[in-house]
Structure formats: C-alpha cells, structure tokens
Amino acid sequence: MSAAGVNEGETISGMLLRPGRVLVVDDDALVARAIALVLGDEHEVVVTTEPLDALDRIARGERYDVILCDLMMPGTTGMELHRRVAACDPGAAARIVFVTGCSVLPEAQAFLASVPNTCLEKPFDLKALRDFIGRRVRAEQPAVRAG
C-alpha cells in the first residue's frame, strides 16, 4: 500500500506512484527507529542520530523528499542543521519538517517564526504522521507516467 492508499504499481490518473525518501534526524535512537517503522512500509527511510551525518549526506547530494528533524538536540540543534543545510542546498532546507517533544524555548520560537518550515509535536498520531508524510512526498515528487 502506498502513501496515497493504493498498492504499489497502481496508478492514479495514469501516473505511477513511487515511495518517497525520508531522512529522520533525531538524537533519540528509539524515537528515530519508531518513526522509521511507522513510515517504512510506504517509503524508503534513512535514520541518523547525528545531525552532522545528515548534513554530510545532503552535502554529498543525497536527496530526500522529506527530512524529519528534531528541533532540540544536544550539540547541533535542528536550527543549526537547517542553517547549514540552507547554505549548501536551499531546496533540502525547505524540505525539513521539524519535530519537537518539549516546550519550545524562546530562541526556538523565534527561529520557527522566521522560517516557513512545518513543526510537528511529539508524540505523533501515527496515522496523521503517515498521511502528512504521504502528502509531502506527493508534493515533492513528479509522478512517473504509466505505460
């Protein structure tokens, strides 16, 4: 079943649907793996607990339809990762969706107000997360013509 609720290989209006590529960046390995399990049936999911690993992947040219990034991490925060990704790949920075499980500090609130990126609150409603990611992937990927 794809993110659109159809089986892989099925078409919608003559267009083939394909799984998206999702990068999950969260310092909590359990949270990152849980997100990967939720999304992994419908998408290719890459997980890292190290923000600088995510930056290296993006700088090397790896492309993701959605980058789910914890906002508050020790060391390199999601805010810093966004700034550094924007410097090397502004398109990738636009595909970052922040996640947070804590009250947002004033610095983070100011940052979120300054960027157009979405911020999701943990804990997630799993169906809502899958649906949200499916919509974002479809918005990022041109479908491939069937036949």
Image (tube, rainbow, N blue to C red):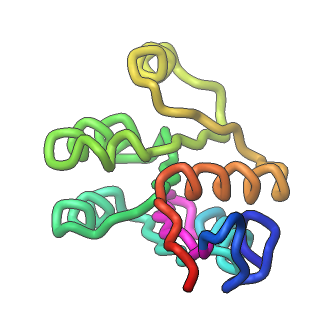
Up/down of 143 relative to 18, above or below? above
- Name above or below for residue 101 compared with residue 145: above
Quadrant that contains the C terminus: bottom right
Q: In this view, does 32 lie to the left or right of 64?
A: right
Q: Which of 5 and 69 is in front in this view?
A: 5
Q: Quadrant of residue 80?
A: top left
Q: Nearer the viewer, residue 26 or 124?
A: 124
Q: Find residue 2 and report its horizontal and vertical position in percent.
A: 72, 74
Task: Report whether 67 appears left or right of 1.
Answer: left
Q: How many labels does the image show?
A: 0
- Using the image, determine if residue 31 lies above or below residue 147: above
Left of 128 or right of it: where is 56?
left
For image coordinates 47% across by 74% down, the residue present is: 46
Q: Please tell me which residue is depicted at 59% across the width and 66% down the height of the picture.
A: 32
Q: Quadrant of residue 104?
A: top right
Q: Does 25 sit left or right of 11 as displayed?
A: left
Q: Nearer the viewer, residue 102 or 21?
A: 21
Residue 113 in picture, x, y percent from top left: 47, 15
Q: What residue is drawn where x is 43% and y is 69%? A: 48
User: Which residue is drawn at the image coordinates 28% and 69% (left, top)?
Assistant: 62
Is residue 33 within the magenta segment?
A: no
Q: What stretch is highlighted in magenta?
A: 16-30
Q: What quarter of the picture does the N terminus occupy?
A: bottom right
Residue 77, percent from left and from top:
37, 42
Q: Which of 91 and 17 is in front in this view?
A: 17
Image coordinates for residue 125, horizontal then vertical, percent: 84, 50
